[in-house]
Amino acid sequence: MSAVEEAANEAPAVEAVPKRAMTLGYGTSLVVLALLIIVPMFLKNFFVFQLTMLLIYALAVLALNILTGGSGQFSLGQSAFYAVGAYTSAILMEHMGVNYALTLPVAGIICFGFGFLFGQPALRLSGIYLALATFALAVAMPQLLKLGFFEHWTGGVQGLVVTKPDAPFGLPISQDRWLYYFTLVVSIGIYIASVNLLKSRSGRAFMAIRDNEIAASAMGVDVALYKTLAFGVSAGITGVAGGLGAIAVQFVAPDGYTITLAISLFLGMVVGGVGWLPGSIVGSAFIIFVPNIAEHISKGLSGAVFGVLLFLVIFLVPHGARQVAMVAQQMLGKLKKN
Amino acid sequence: MELFTNQVLAGIATGAIYACMALAVVMIYQAIDHLNFAQGEMAMFSTFISWQLMQWGIPYWWAFLATLIISFAGGIIIERLLFKPLAKAPVLTNVAGFIALFAIVNSVAGLIWDFTIKQYPTPFGSSPFLGSQLISTHQAGMIGVTVGLLILLYLFFQFTRIGLAMRAAAAMPESARLVGINTSWMIALGWGMASAIGAIAGILIAPVVFLEPNMMGGVLIYGFAAAVLGGLTSPLGAVVGGFLVGVFENLAGTYIPGVGNELKLPIALALIITVLVLKPAGLFGRPIVKRV
Amino acid sequence: MTAMLNIKDLRAYYGQVQALHGLSFSLNEGSLTTLLGANGAGKTTTLRAICNMVRSTGAIEFEGKPLSGKSTENVVRLGIAHVPQGRGTFTTMTVEENLQLGAITRNNKKAVVTDIERMYEHFPVLKERHTQQAGTLSGGEQQMLAVARALMLRPRLMLLDEPSFGLAPLIVRELFKILGKINREEKVTILVVEQNAQLALELADQAYVIETGRIVMSGNAKDIANNEDVRKSYLGY
């Protein structure tokens, strides 16, 4: 099938999620925020670290959600952007002595540029073909990082060790806890910016492209610009997540950013609900905790257990956490009426 | 020049593997309109079944035949059990289902047959083919089987009623129901056929890459790439694409400096993407003329 | 005359939205009936409900057999051919393959071959283009193909959803002439849903008018055509 035919004729691969349905109400948001602030105070450092990773992966899933749920493009290459962000932060910190917080915007900007450029050839591709192209990027990235040519900077196969930052101003909290709250602030900032982006003119343009590319271009939306822009924004956010990940894990190495990571992020998006931004954190929890749970249930069959759990989730809620939220909202509505 | 010819020959030999897998990929794409990421794992599982049958003393060809039948039935059962309930779910949810299936099959195969590498026999022998050191009789036999399979599939889809019905169900399910086609069963049938073709691919590939639960990882990626390169709607394209990818990969490994084994795959993929950017429907994908 | 299709208290739903509110009507064997109504009145939904393509309640009986609970393809196999809105052309396949698909449920190969020849006589333009991809045909030609494809089923009942949609008036006239011929010569009962009320009433012998999911008027097509309300609302004079 030609791309034109596909765009013109088939129902869009990504369901149209109305703008209003992409976020949480104020009340719920505040409850979630309060939980995110209070709970880590009572946890051991290791669990705090896990929560930090939860936020970081949630950011990466959110980034994919903007690309797929927002503009209807599909990417299996998010691990590549994540890797670029992680390496940018690590190299700036370790080779140039830049403060960790300052490396994040740099990682974001570099990844934005990278994603924007990658979006150019991707413009000609859609659906399966775009998936393959982004997949190639994900497969190539670890190999590129291992190249001898960059070894001085990247540390080659060995990777780089990253120093964990202390809490500033002599605050009496552990490194892990400080990093958690730092990540939380960055995440909230990016979440709010993303919500506003999707509510803006650009967001409407993304969604118009998602729902019907030809109609969107007929209405005067610069399809090429907005599609590449979506790629850029998504890559940029993924890059920030990657940078945060490097700092939290204290280590970057090529084999940490394989296609498996990209697939995990994809699963996170599906489980959270495609196009529903708050679902990103649910999806992130799924990809962090469920493999662990599977490992606990059966060591030898952990892959199978994970697969079965994943099937259970998509059987019960094919639209992911978004579906749960919608049902809950309806039930609440009924309760209020009574 | 001799180096070049040799590398092309070697490329064609590995290309036969990809072509075979690509054929299975196109088959299921025709039937269900998605790429099944678990297809390689299903093929691996089928190959293990045939190996197990041979271990129990069943002769090669009987084991082959039995495996085809088991795989065909298995494909249908998987569709009925796991993917029919997802028929109305979003496309991306289905893709997540494929990933889940991948994890399950891989893990179960590892538990039953463990992860050690196993020898797998070939019915074609492995002496040099027509005096060439680069193509063995097994690889020649593989090319022969792939081409034969291609011809059979072509005849099936072009000239049988059920082939026509399957194409119709995949292209326009609603219209297909309105002419009385049971589209749901057509999909199951597609799964069965793809699974059986995957089994053939696995059995042919196993003597080359050896038998183990992860044997198909790389092959499937090349198979996808070949199928996409050839145009997902064309079985002929898939086979040609398979050979091209094999040759690409070998030549890049030989002539581009700094490309070791590690970078072969990214380079091959990059070339394919270049082709796609120039020709988005693949080399053999039928460009469709449509009035709006 | 006996009723071939009997519909009682048909209600249909799209998700939470109810589209039909207790529709009842019947078709006589051999008749050519038209279902008239404005946009959104529920005409298409009625046809889709007959083929079980939309969630519905109520009783639909075809030649005495209930259709509820039957899948779309099994309804079709009873001899009900449905030409949907948008014509349902298999655009990527050739004209001839489209005709073969129409007869895909029939087992007698020879009869199918002769039927294809017969269709080429009815619609010479299809013969000219028999190896062409169906998607490349003009709108009018595709509509001819859709009718021909439906006839390949050898249907007892044919449902047509706005066959005039998007066609030039001249072509619509030609198409309706052919429908009349099919009804008389091939003894196919036809139910045609139309917005083009004038032409539909000229063609049909029975007519129903549907408004917001209910039948509001029924009777002989000529009487309906002369009805003042219908003239004002649907015929525009």
Image (tube, coloured by chain):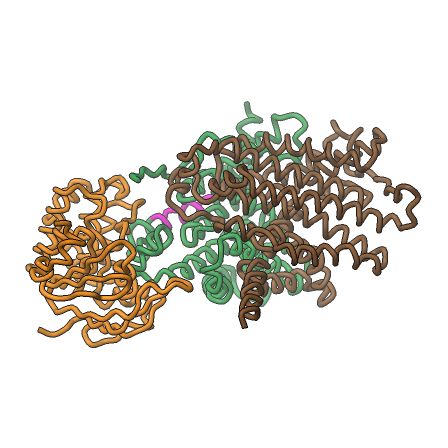
Q: Residue at x 27, y 63 (%)?
A: C46
Question: Residue A199 location, x and y as percent?
Answer: 56, 43
Q: Colour of chain A?
A: brown
Q: Quadrant of the C terminus of chain B?
A: top left
Residue A135: image quadrant is: top right
Question: Residue C19 location, x and y as percent?
Answer: 33, 63
Question: Against A185, is C81 above or below?
Answer: below
Question: Against A239, is A338 above or below?
Answer: below
Q: Residue at x 82, y 43 (%)?
A: A250
Q: Quadrant of the N terminus of chain B?
A: top right
Residue A36: image quadrant is: bottom right
Question: Residue A228 location, x and y as percent?
Answer: 55, 33
Q: Is B16 included in the stretch rendered in magenta?
A: no
Q: Colour of chain B?
A: green
Residue range (magenta) = B141-154
Question: Against B46, is A72 above or below?
Answer: above
Residue B179: image quadrant is: bottom left
